[in-house]
Amino acid sequence: MDLIIGSHVSFSKDKQMLGSVIEALSYKANTFMFYTGAPQNTNRSLIDDKLTELAHNLMLNENINIKDVIVHAPYIINLANDKNYDFNIKFLKEEIKRVEKLGVSKLVLHPGSHVGLGIEAGINNIIKSLNDCLTPDTKVIICLETMAGKGSELGCTFEQLKTIIDGVKEKDKIGVCLDTCHISDAGYDLNNFDKVLEEFDNIIGLDKLKVLHINDSKNICGAKKDRHENIGYGQIGFDNLLKILYHDKLKDIPKILETPYVDTELGKLAPYKFEIQMIRDKKFNDHLINDIVLDNK
């Protein structure tokens, strides 16, 4: 089976998911992830059903399985702190409806930061919020993202995620998105990924792992800083990431790149076409920036 790999792509008001598919295809990807609007605000355009239909038809023609496509929830949703509880619940419910309308089945969500309330109170808030948002009729799986542990972030250990999952009533509507940069920054040693995956399986269960964010890290293991780096250019390293990407137990799980745009003489440019090619070739590209510049001239 071909590697299921793609990247974060844009979602514009004018082209919506059709534009997302076209961008993903330009990177030679067979999946992709997008926000349905800016991640830092509530501005959302109405979903255009005609554009969605065109996007689905193009995906069918290009062998992109809609089941592998991911939406990322906006950062401004913070379920761990109940200060803006009504806003968070309302906005998350609206986002779930938008994802359902687009025909996508996986929504990645940062669990949230407790902002001084404490870990236990924060986790209880997340559980309560998810139970208020999810019903037996929900068609979307909320994929809680593993976090780096920056500040008062929750979800930075497998145990915390397990506690949240255990408290959610609609357990079939909850999964996990494992981010390689985040778990490395949280202290999981990806030099021994088999051990990390075994720990995940023992605590949470591999059946709950629905998405992988594949990112290198600018920081050493355990730094708790969350700064993504391009594939093979960071502290995790190309060989370690390649082992994760091609791991037998993860072959059916979509892999999404969220690596940073690179600074070039032409401005900041997306690296995904070349990183995906590097991954498919299983050979590190040590002249990534030069290739990107040449491709954009």
Image (cartoon, helix red, strand yellow):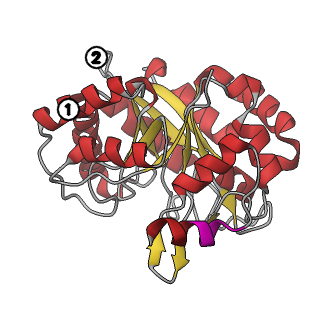
Looking at the rendered structure, the kind of residue marked 2 is Asp
Residue 56 lies, in percent from the top left, at 27, 28
Picture coordinates of residue 222, whole percent (x, y) = 78, 61
Labelled disc at residue 35: none
Q: Where does label 1 land, which residue?
A: 54
In the image shown, does 138 or 215 lie closer to the viewer? 215
| Local secondary structure at mark 1 | helix
What element does badge 2 sit on? loop
Give the residue type at disc 1: Leu
Residue 288: in magenta span:
yes
85 displayed left or right of 127: left
Give the main secondary structure of the magenta stretch.
Answer: helix
Residue at 82% x, 49% y is 239
Residue segment shown in magenta: 287-291
Q: Nearer the viewer, mark 1 or mark 2?
A: 1
Which of the 4 image quadrants contains residue 195?
Answer: top right
Closer-to-camera residue (156/131)? 156
Residue 181 coordinates in the image, percent (x, y): 67, 55
Q: Answer whether residue 289 is magenta in the image.
A: yes
Q: Quadrant of the N terminus?
A: top right
Circle 2 is placed at which residue position?
137
Q: Is residue 184 left or right of residue 226?
A: right
